[in-house]
Amino acid sequence: MDDGRELALKQFDRLRYPTKVSWDMWTLACTWGSSTSWVDGQMAGREKEVLLEMDSVADLGIDLLQIDSGRQVSPGGDVNHPIPTHGWRPDSQSYPDGWYAVAARRDPLGIRLGLWAVAEAIPFKDLEWNWEQWRLTQFKLDFANRNHYGTMVKLVEKVRRFELFTDHRGIVGWDTTENASRFGYYWAREYGDRHFMNRKPKVPPNAVDIPWLALRDFWHLARYNNLNKWQLVTQNPETVDPSLSDAVQHSVAYCSTPTLMGIPEFMTLTRTYSASSRSQVRALLKIYKQYQKEIFESFVFAIGDEPSNRSWAGSQSYHPGNNEGFLLLFRERLNLDQRKHIHWRFVPSGPASTFEDLETGAKRRVMLDHDGSASRTITEPADFLFLRFSRENS
């Protein structure tokens, strides 16, 4: 697909499924991400753990904490069954004062909160009740295994009713992790964004985080989708099983950076980050948030070669009419080349372009080749560049 046709497709898609910065643009973390069983996953969703995670998320500069399964189950309840028998409100043992402590802690920390639920099981009255209690930003709807048109219509009607009730301030996030047949995750995006997939530290094996595979997923997704409609997931590589993945051989910054062209989701208990990794996340998000709005409102395109753990690959933001954009470029762990000739999308040859390294502040003026390409250097493997480019007028 050439540049013009790919841009036209994405422009049409954004007209049909628009986004709004004040409602849709954030970074988030999920309490379920470090779980290795239903038991510890549910434990992470209870009040004491959630309050600790809220403090950690705020310290890192993450905007929103998604409270996953756990708040609806009592400490002695059936943790292997996520659907409660008493309704989708916080369990009185897990949350003695309901949402009071969590809601009271949210505003001083300056963060948002979201809530997980089983899509078909949660009734409208519980969507309504939870919204009225604390004006949560997003309901993440999971297990929407729609294999019948009639049940799919009922789900969409419930979601539409909820968003009208909240005057479109209550956003829905679709969880697309499950493998079974589903309806709505491509075309129901007027109701919210989509959680791409779980990235886990140990189990299940098919969801264990593998950095090059995550990069490949996002690279292909960017070829046909607007990434600001997707929650792009990263895991803490320090906690990933080294017998299943080479994640531990990458920095936290390397693993987190590919998500920046979409909606970055830290699918991990952020309290598991070491002190040095916390510093990397803070520094990365501090830089990113200066340019987040520009990236979010742009169109994102894949650049370089298909990720394979041996490639140079990345993504580029572009906004028609602007002379600036952003580049993420990765030299994968097994790649042997310090320097790579890269074709930049929508950057014409002739007039010079200035590339600014957003981590170091270093600037370099480059005259692009006849095909709109230029060379870049990354000295070490498993490293990246986060660049802003500006084009000079001809």
Image (cartoon, helix red, strand yellow):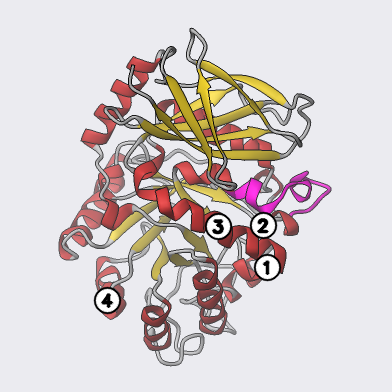
- Describe the element under mark 2 as helix, strand or loop: loop
Residue 272 marker: 1
Alpha carbon distance from label 3 to label 1: 11 Å
Q: CA distance from mark 2 to mark 1?
A: 8 Å
Label 2–label 3 contact, CB within 8 A: yes
Q: Residues within 10 Å of mark 4 (few under 14, many from 20)?
A: few
Residue depicted at x 20% and y 54%: 160
- As drawn, the label of residue 236 is 2
Q: Is residue 363 magenta?
A: no
In depth, the one of 5 and 177 nearer the eye is 5
What is the span of residues highlighted in magenta in the rendered image? 240-256
In front: label 4 or label 3? 3
Kindly check if marks 2 and 1 are in contact, taking CB atoms under 8 A apart as contact: yes
N-term-proximal mark, 4 vs 2: 4
Three-letter code for the amino acid on which mark 3 is drawn: Phe
Q: Earlier in the sequence, mark 1 or mark 4?
A: 4
Vertical arrangement, residue 45 with respect to residue 312, above or below: below
Cβ atoms under marks 4 and 3 closer than 8 Å:
no
Q: Identity of the amino acid at label 4?
A: Trp
User: Which sits earlier in the primary sequence, circle 4 or circle 3?
Assistant: 4
Q: Is residue 83 visible?
A: yes
The residue labelled by disc 4 is: 129
Which residue is pictured at 40% across the width and 59% down the height? 140
The residue at which mark 3 appears reads as 266
Residue drawn at (31%, 50%) of the image: 192
Mark 2 or mark 3, which has the lower sequence index? 2
**Along the horizontal axis of the image, is 302 left or right of 192?**
right
Tell me, yes or no, whether the two marked residues, 3 and 1, touch with CB atoms within 8 Å. no
